[in-house]
Amino acid sequence: MKAEFEKIASPADHSFNSFIFNNKRFNAPWHFHPEFELTYIVKGKGIRYVGNSIQKFEEGDFVLLGQDIPHCWKNTDDNVEHVQSIIFQWDEELLGKDWIEKQEFSNIKKLFSKSRQGIKFSPETASEFSAQLFELLALDPFKKILGFIELLETLSKVKDFELLSSANFTPILNRKANNRIEAVYHFVRHNYDKKIKLSDVSSLVAMTDEAFCRFFKKTFNKSFFTFVNEYRINLACKSLTETKKQVSQIAYDCGYESLPFFYKQFQKFMNCSPLHFRKNPHE
Protein backbone atom coordinates (compact mmCIF):
# COMPACT_ATOMS: atom_id res chain seq x y z
CA MET A 1 0.00 0.00 0.00
CA LYS A 2 1.30 3.46 -0.88
CA ALA A 3 1.43 5.79 2.11
CA GLU A 4 0.50 8.93 0.25
CA PHE A 5 -2.86 10.10 1.53
CA GLU A 6 -1.67 12.15 4.49
CA LYS A 7 1.80 13.51 5.03
CA ILE A 8 2.30 13.98 8.75
CA ALA A 9 4.88 16.61 9.56
CA SER A 10 7.01 15.22 12.36
CA PRO A 11 8.45 17.90 14.67
CA ALA A 12 12.18 18.26 14.15
CA ASP A 13 12.87 18.72 17.86
CA HIS A 14 10.54 16.04 19.28
CA SER A 15 10.24 12.26 18.99
CA PHE A 16 6.51 12.26 18.24
CA ASN A 17 3.42 14.40 17.69
CA SER A 18 1.02 15.02 20.57
CA PHE A 19 -1.79 17.54 20.40
CA ILE A 20 -5.43 18.34 21.06
CA PHE A 21 -7.60 18.57 17.95
CA ASN A 22 -10.37 21.17 18.19
CA ASN A 23 -12.82 21.89 15.39
CA LYS A 24 -16.50 22.19 14.52
CA ARG A 25 -16.45 18.69 13.00
CA PHE A 26 -14.20 15.70 12.47
CA ASN A 27 -13.43 16.53 8.86
CA ALA A 28 -10.41 14.38 7.96
CA PRO A 29 -11.01 12.36 4.79
CA TRP A 30 -10.58 8.60 4.51
CA HIS A 31 -6.81 8.43 4.71
CA PHE A 32 -3.80 6.52 5.88
CA HIS A 33 -0.22 7.26 6.84
CA PRO A 34 2.91 5.29 7.82
CA GLU A 35 2.79 6.63 11.37
CA PHE A 36 1.07 4.89 14.29
CA GLU A 37 -1.79 6.84 15.84
CA LEU A 38 -3.48 6.81 19.25
CA THR A 39 -6.75 8.75 19.38
CA TYR A 40 -9.01 9.56 22.31
CA ILE A 41 -12.33 11.28 21.60
CA VAL A 42 -13.00 13.94 24.21
CA LYS A 43 -16.11 15.36 22.60
CA GLY A 44 -18.10 14.25 19.56
CA LYS A 45 -20.22 11.40 18.20
CA GLY A 46 -20.57 9.74 14.83
CA ILE A 47 -19.30 6.86 12.73
CA ARG A 48 -15.73 5.55 12.86
CA TYR A 49 -14.18 3.80 9.86
CA VAL A 50 -11.06 1.67 10.32
CA GLY A 51 -10.06 -0.67 7.51
CA ASN A 52 -13.26 -2.54 6.73
CA SER A 53 -14.79 -1.82 10.15
CA ILE A 54 -17.64 0.65 10.54
CA GLN A 55 -18.90 1.45 14.05
CA LYS A 56 -20.55 4.29 15.90
CA PHE A 57 -18.32 6.24 18.26
CA GLU A 58 -18.93 8.66 21.09
CA GLU A 59 -17.03 10.49 23.79
CA GLY A 60 -14.42 8.20 25.31
CA ASP A 61 -13.65 6.34 22.08
CA PHE A 62 -10.03 5.17 22.49
CA VAL A 63 -8.32 3.64 19.45
CA LEU A 64 -4.79 2.63 18.47
CA LEU A 65 -4.06 2.42 14.75
CA GLY A 66 -1.11 0.69 13.15
CA GLN A 67 0.82 1.83 10.11
CA ASP A 68 -0.99 2.42 6.83
CA ILE A 69 -4.45 1.33 7.95
CA PRO A 70 -7.12 3.56 6.33
CA HIS A 71 -9.33 5.38 8.80
CA CYS A 72 -11.49 8.39 9.59
CA TRP A 73 -14.01 9.61 12.13
CA LYS A 74 -17.18 11.28 10.75
CA ASN A 75 -19.90 13.17 12.61
CA THR A 76 -23.49 12.12 11.99
CA ASP A 77 -25.11 15.09 13.72
CA ASP A 78 -25.18 18.27 11.65
CA ASN A 79 -25.96 20.32 14.76
CA VAL A 80 -22.60 19.61 16.42
CA GLU A 81 -20.89 22.85 17.43
CA HIS A 82 -17.55 21.55 18.66
CA VAL A 83 -15.52 18.33 18.66
CA GLN A 84 -12.27 17.53 20.42
CA SER A 85 -9.79 14.68 20.51
CA ILE A 86 -6.34 13.92 21.89
CA ILE A 87 -3.96 12.54 19.26
CA PHE A 88 -0.52 10.95 19.46
CA GLN A 89 1.36 10.09 16.24
CA TRP A 90 4.78 8.49 15.91
CA ASP A 91 6.84 6.61 13.35
CA GLU A 92 8.56 3.25 13.64
CA GLU A 93 11.83 4.90 14.72
CA LEU A 94 10.30 6.51 17.80
CA LEU A 95 13.36 5.63 19.90
CA GLY A 96 15.79 5.05 17.05
CA LYS A 97 16.32 2.36 14.44
CA ASP A 98 15.20 -1.15 15.46
CA TRP A 99 14.36 -0.06 19.02
CA ILE A 100 11.22 -2.20 18.97
CA GLU A 101 13.33 -5.35 18.48
CA LYS A 102 14.97 -4.96 21.89
CA GLN A 103 13.79 -7.32 24.62
CA GLU A 104 12.69 -4.45 26.85
CA PHE A 105 10.00 -3.51 24.35
CA SER A 106 8.69 -6.99 23.49
CA ASN A 107 5.24 -6.23 24.93
CA ILE A 108 4.97 -3.02 22.93
CA LYS A 109 6.04 -4.91 19.80
CA LYS A 110 3.10 -7.29 20.31
CA LEU A 111 0.78 -4.31 20.79
CA PHE A 112 1.99 -2.77 17.53
CA SER A 113 1.42 -6.06 15.74
CA LYS A 114 -2.21 -6.13 16.88
CA SER A 115 -2.63 -2.49 15.89
CA ARG A 116 -2.38 -3.47 12.21
CA GLN A 117 -6.09 -4.21 12.47
CA GLY A 118 -6.87 -1.24 14.68
CA ILE A 119 -7.46 -1.67 18.42
CA LYS A 120 -10.47 -0.23 20.23
CA PHE A 121 -9.99 -0.22 23.98
CA SER A 122 -13.00 -0.71 26.24
CA PRO A 123 -14.85 2.29 27.73
CA GLU A 124 -13.53 1.29 31.15
CA THR A 125 -9.94 1.37 29.89
CA ALA A 126 -10.55 4.69 28.14
CA SER A 127 -11.94 6.20 31.34
CA GLU A 128 -8.97 4.90 33.31
CA PHE A 129 -6.44 6.56 30.98
CA SER A 130 -8.23 9.78 30.02
CA ALA A 131 -6.67 11.93 32.76
CA GLN A 132 -3.22 10.50 32.02
CA LEU A 133 -3.50 11.48 28.36
CA PHE A 134 -4.16 15.11 29.26
CA GLU A 135 -1.32 15.06 31.77
CA LEU A 136 1.10 13.72 29.17
CA LEU A 137 0.43 16.69 26.90
CA ALA A 138 1.53 19.10 29.60
CA LEU A 139 4.85 17.42 30.46
CA ASP A 140 8.26 18.66 29.36
CA PRO A 141 9.74 16.74 26.38
CA PHE A 142 11.92 14.33 28.39
CA LYS A 143 9.18 13.35 30.83
CA LYS A 144 6.68 13.19 27.98
CA ILE A 145 8.58 10.55 26.00
CA LEU A 146 9.19 8.50 29.16
CA GLY A 147 5.53 8.78 30.09
CA PHE A 148 4.44 7.86 26.58
CA ILE A 149 6.57 4.70 26.49
CA GLU A 150 5.17 3.76 29.89
CA LEU A 151 1.67 4.33 28.53
CA LEU A 152 2.32 2.00 25.58
CA GLU A 153 3.75 -0.64 27.91
CA THR A 154 0.65 -0.41 30.12
CA LEU A 155 -1.71 -0.58 27.13
CA SER A 156 0.15 -3.67 25.87
CA LYS A 157 -1.05 -5.51 28.98
CA VAL A 158 -4.70 -4.48 28.71
CA LYS A 159 -6.95 -7.48 28.03
CA ASP A 160 -10.25 -5.70 27.38
CA PHE A 161 -10.05 -4.57 23.75
CA GLU A 162 -11.50 -5.23 20.31
CA LEU A 163 -9.69 -5.67 17.01
CA LEU A 164 -11.54 -3.56 14.46
CA SER A 165 -10.59 -4.54 10.92
CA SER A 166 -10.49 -8.14 9.72
CA ALA A 167 -7.04 -9.75 9.56
CA ASN A 168 -7.22 -10.26 5.80
CA PHE A 169 -8.07 -6.64 5.00
CA THR A 170 -5.40 -5.40 2.57
CA PRO A 171 -6.77 -2.51 0.50
CA ILE A 172 -4.90 -1.25 -2.52
CA LEU A 173 -5.49 2.48 -2.49
CA ASN A 174 -4.29 5.48 -4.46
CA ARG A 175 -5.39 9.10 -4.75
CA LYS A 176 -8.06 8.31 -7.32
CA ALA A 177 -9.46 5.58 -5.08
CA ASN A 178 -9.39 7.97 -2.12
CA ASN A 179 -11.50 10.50 -4.04
CA ARG A 180 -13.99 7.78 -4.97
CA ILE A 181 -14.29 6.62 -1.37
CA GLU A 182 -14.85 10.17 -0.14
CA ALA A 183 -17.60 10.59 -2.75
CA VAL A 184 -19.24 7.34 -1.61
CA TYR A 185 -19.08 8.38 2.07
CA HIS A 186 -20.66 11.73 1.24
CA PHE A 187 -23.39 10.10 -0.83
CA VAL A 188 -24.32 7.54 1.86
CA ARG A 189 -24.25 10.14 4.63
CA HIS A 190 -26.73 12.35 2.78
CA ASN A 191 -28.92 9.61 1.29
CA TYR A 192 -29.03 6.79 3.87
CA ASP A 193 -32.69 7.62 4.64
CA LYS A 194 -33.70 7.10 1.03
CA LYS A 195 -33.74 4.13 -1.30
CA ILE A 196 -30.20 3.77 -2.64
CA LYS A 197 -29.68 2.22 -6.04
CA LEU A 198 -26.35 0.81 -7.15
CA SER A 199 -26.53 2.80 -10.39
CA ASP A 200 -26.75 6.07 -8.42
CA VAL A 201 -23.47 5.56 -6.61
CA SER A 202 -21.59 3.87 -9.47
CA SER A 203 -22.40 6.74 -11.84
CA LEU A 204 -21.30 9.18 -9.13
CA VAL A 205 -17.75 7.80 -9.37
CA ALA A 206 -17.88 7.28 -13.14
CA MET A 207 -17.83 3.49 -13.03
CA THR A 208 -20.12 0.73 -14.28
CA ASP A 209 -22.13 -1.15 -11.67
CA GLU A 210 -19.93 -4.21 -12.06
CA ALA A 211 -16.65 -2.26 -11.88
CA PHE A 212 -17.83 -0.36 -8.82
CA CYS A 213 -18.84 -3.56 -7.01
CA ARG A 214 -15.42 -5.07 -7.71
CA PHE A 215 -13.65 -1.87 -6.58
CA PHE A 216 -15.64 -1.62 -3.35
CA LYS A 217 -15.27 -5.31 -2.52
CA LYS A 218 -11.52 -5.16 -3.14
CA THR A 219 -11.16 -2.01 -1.05
CA PHE A 220 -13.32 -2.97 1.96
CA ASN A 221 -13.58 -6.75 1.72
CA LYS A 222 -17.37 -6.34 1.88
CA SER A 223 -20.13 -5.39 -0.51
CA PHE A 224 -21.39 -1.84 -0.90
CA PHE A 225 -24.84 -2.70 0.47
CA THR A 226 -23.32 -4.41 3.51
CA PHE A 227 -21.54 -1.11 4.11
CA VAL A 228 -24.82 0.81 3.71
CA ASN A 229 -26.63 -1.47 6.16
CA GLU A 230 -23.81 -1.16 8.71
CA TYR A 231 -24.08 2.62 8.43
CA ARG A 232 -27.86 2.54 8.86
CA ILE A 233 -27.79 0.13 11.80
CA ASN A 234 -25.20 2.26 13.60
CA LEU A 235 -27.47 5.28 13.20
CA ALA A 236 -30.39 3.19 14.43
CA CYS A 237 -28.41 2.32 17.55
CA LYS A 238 -27.80 6.02 18.14
CA SER A 239 -31.55 6.75 17.88
CA LEU A 240 -32.45 3.83 20.13
CA THR A 241 -30.23 5.14 22.94
CA GLU A 242 -30.80 8.88 22.49
CA THR A 243 -34.50 9.11 21.60
CA LYS A 244 -37.82 7.56 22.59
CA LYS A 245 -38.95 7.01 19.02
CA GLN A 246 -40.80 3.83 18.13
CA VAL A 247 -38.63 1.16 16.52
CA SER A 248 -40.72 1.33 13.35
CA GLN A 249 -40.10 5.09 13.07
CA ILE A 250 -36.36 4.61 13.61
CA ALA A 251 -36.29 1.95 10.91
CA TYR A 252 -38.05 4.27 8.50
CA ASP A 253 -35.80 7.23 9.40
CA CYS A 254 -32.74 5.10 8.65
CA GLY A 255 -33.97 4.17 5.18
CA TYR A 256 -35.70 0.83 5.78
CA GLU A 257 -39.03 0.41 4.02
CA SER A 258 -39.52 -3.09 5.42
CA LEU A 259 -39.65 -3.54 9.20
CA PRO A 260 -38.89 -7.31 9.05
CA PHE A 261 -35.80 -6.57 6.94
CA PHE A 262 -34.69 -3.95 9.47
CA TYR A 263 -35.02 -6.47 12.30
CA LYS A 264 -33.05 -9.01 10.26
CA GLN A 265 -30.23 -6.56 9.59
CA PHE A 266 -30.18 -5.36 13.20
CA GLN A 267 -29.86 -8.93 14.45
CA LYS A 268 -27.10 -9.60 11.91
CA PHE A 269 -24.92 -6.68 12.97
CA MET A 270 -25.78 -6.31 16.67
CA ASN A 271 -26.65 -9.92 17.63
CA CYS A 272 -29.79 -8.80 19.41
CA SER A 273 -33.15 -7.16 18.76
CA PRO A 274 -33.61 -3.36 18.69
CA LEU A 275 -35.64 -3.43 21.93
CA HIS A 276 -33.02 -5.52 23.69
CA PHE A 277 -30.33 -3.08 22.56
CA ARG A 278 -32.39 -0.12 23.81
CA LYS A 279 -32.63 -1.69 27.27
CA ASN A 280 -29.01 -2.95 27.32
CA PRO A 281 -26.93 -0.67 25.04
CA HIS A 282 -23.60 -1.53 26.69
CA GLU A 283 -23.92 -5.32 26.75
Image (tube, grey):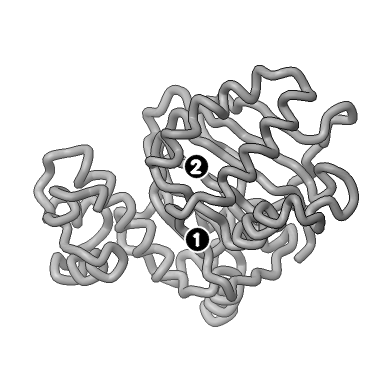
> Which residue is identified by label 1?
163
Q: Quadrant of residue 51?
A: bottom right
**Could you tell which of marks 2 and 1 lies nearer the N-terminus?**
2
> Quick one: SS at disc 1?
strand
Q: Is residue 3 left or right of residue 60?
A: right
User: What x and y, as percent, mark residue 113?
Assistant: 66, 62
Q: Give the side of residue 155 with respect to residue 160, left or right.
A: right
Q: Name the mark on residue 27.
A: none
Residue at 34% across / 64% down in the picture? 229
Count the marks: how many?
Answer: 2
Q: Looking at the image, which residue is at 28% across and 45% down? A: 238
What label does residue 62 carry, if any?
2
Q: Is residue 257 above or below residue 40?
A: below
As drawn, 19 above or below 280: above
Q: Is residue 34 left or right of residue 45?
A: right
Judging depth in this view, the residue of 153 and 247 nearest the camera is: 153
The quadrant in which the N terminus is found is bottom right
Q: Nearer the viewer, residue 57 or 239?
A: 57
Question: In which image quadrant can residue 195 be found?
Answer: bottom left
Residue farthest along the front direction in this orientation: 103
Q: Nearer the viewer, residue 276 or 126?
A: 126
Report the residue at 67% width, 31% height from top.
147
Callout 1 environment at 10 Å: few (<14), some (14 to 19), or many (20+)?
A: some
Q: In the rendered structure, which amino acid carries the disc numbered 2?
A: Phe
Can you see residue 188?
no
x, y percent for residue 216: 55, 71
Q: Is residue 232 above or below residue 83?
A: below
Mark 2–mark 1 distance (CA, rounded to whole Å): 12 Å
Who is closer to the viewer here, 218 or 120?
Answer: 120
Local SS, label 2: strand
Image location of residue 274, percent across then percent down: 17, 57
Q: How far from the left and from the top, in percent, is residue 200?
A: 46, 65
